[in-house]
Amino acid sequence: LPFANKDNISVRGKRLSCSSKILQGYVAPYNATVIGRLLDAGAVPLGRCNQDEFAMGSSTEYSIYGPTRNPINRDYVSGGSSGGSTAAVAANQALFGLGTETGGSVRLPASYCGVYGLKPTYGVLSRWGVVAYGSSLDQVGIIGHTPADIARPLAVMCGADMYDDTSADLPEGKSLLSLEACSAAELAALRIAVPKQFLESKGMDADVAKVFAETRAWFGSKGATIETVDLPVLDASIASYYVIALSEAASNLSRFDGIRYGERVDNSNGYDQLYVDTRSAGFGPEVKRRIIIGNYVLSEQFSGDTYKKGMSVRARIQRELAQLFERYDLVLCPTCPTPAFRLGQKVDDPLAMYLSDLFTTFVNLARIPSLSVPAGHTSGKGVEAGLTKGFDGEFLKAAATGHSDSMPVGIQFAGPMFSEKKILRIAQAWEEEHPGCGCPVKG
Amino acid sequence: MQTISGTIAALKAGTVTSRALVQESIDTFEADRTSALPLNAFLEIYDDALALADAADKEI
């Protein structure tokens, strides 16, 4: 089974660049654990895919190789940072794809490209051989056309790894090889929480809100209990995320100094100048921005206070979500407040780009699993906004042309730690009533 | 669109080979790469993809 690999996951003897100039010429000396396990199972890594440089971005525009386009409308972004793997799956260039998440980099492109994207519980997939961004948040993710297409690679790759001390076994992981949809009785017994903070978000696109309302109505029609919950701490999740992620990034990326990896700029002015010249020439502007912010947050001037506050908010998010999941099975919310946007629209506006992650970062901070489900689409010529109904629907016909002005909308199914099987079974029940919703480009 | 479960069933039934699947993916990529507005999803197709597929076919 051919799969698409992200350019930050090591395949022995193959180039790996993180879509950065600084890693040009670098060849991975060993396989990432997830790659090794897939190879052992007979899967075939087809090639490496585009991404935002060092996975820092939400649109796959911050890449030295240029942007990855959205298969549904090639004037639109694919989302990021795992936009290459996701677009490859959506365009039927691979059966499934591997991406990585720090704050939504699998779910966001999955939502923009109209496929399923899973961010597993932190530790379920080993990070050995994956280039680090924010180590306490990083996790390998899977992109596929159906929940079952995600479950099978997850079953093969999951489990503790002696090379990654933060890795963990996934209960019932191997049973994911044959995923069964939730029964009607199980759906009716679900208790679903909808955070008020996301429901009332000011930046939410009207069509995204409509798809979200119809998704809630679908669960309601199955007998599930849906309640709005108030979690004020979620308002601080994106600020906390950027403090933690950028601090860890500044530390992790210090290893790219021109001595150990990739390209070196040596003007014979001593080691200090070699580091400066190499990093100045090798990193792109977004990576530099994040390293500078991260180092600023960690600087002596603040005595690490900002980082400590970020960690304190994170602890509260983890605690409050754990308490929430004592009463509910699922948190339901859109993957992103807006659908995919035009290429270039936000590339010079970092704040607008960062806000793409508004609904995704709480999942990474809480280390819980979440699946972006290609639930519906926005309105366009001859297409009304709403749930994607099937292969013969107007949206999928428009999507197959490659220049649809109706774009996909993803809804997240998030559950407590290690609830991957339950989430995927619920999504499979969704898929069976909305066949083809994860296949935007029919092959 | 092919799903994994459908593809595995076809591999087991012998109606498709791993090489054919990989070749189909490569062909789809090549057709896109030479189109007016390529996706730019794959940066590189690994040179041993077909050899790995052949090895997988032998195991099946």
Image: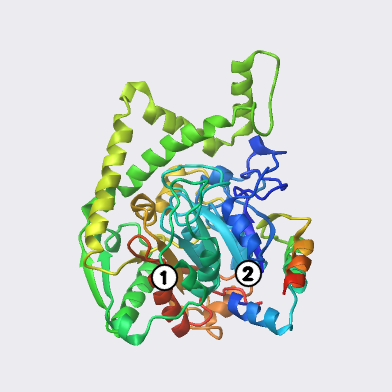
SS category of the residue bearing label 1: helix
- Disc on res. A432: none
Chain holding disc 1: A
CB under 8 Å between discs 1 and 2: no
What's the CA distance linking mark 1 and mark 2?
20 Å
- Between label 1 and label 2, give the one nearer the viewer: 1
On screen, residue A359 above or below A130: below
Residue type marked 2: Leu
**The N terminus of chain A - image quarter:** bottom right
Q: Nearer the viewer, residue A189 or A299?
A: A189
Q: Nearer the viewer, residue A363 or A56?
A: A363
Q: Residue at x 51, y 65 (%)?
A: A154
On screen, residue A158 above or below A92: above
Q: What colouring does the structure picture have?
A: rainbow
Give x and y (percent) for residue B29: 73, 64
Other residues around mark 1 within 10 Å, as few (<14) / some (14–19) / many (≥20): many
User: How many dots with numbers?
Assistant: 2
Give x and y (percent) for residue A36: 62, 55
Earlier residue among tags 1 and 2 = 2
Side of B28 where A242 appears, left or right: left
Same subunit, labels 1 and 2: the answer reads yes
Q: Residue at x 64, y 35 (%)?
A: A22
Using the rendered image of the protein, determine whether residue B15 is visible from the camera's viewpoint: yes
SS category of the residue bearing label 2: loop
Side of B43 where A193 appears, left or right: left
Q: Which residue is mark 2?
A: A95
**Residue A28: which quarter of the image?**
top right
Other residues around mark 2 within 10 Å, as few (<14) / some (14–19) / many (≥20): many
Given the current orientation, which residue lies at the most extreme top position? A269
Q: Which residue is mark 1?
A: A421
Q: Residue at x 46, y 30 (%)?
A: A292
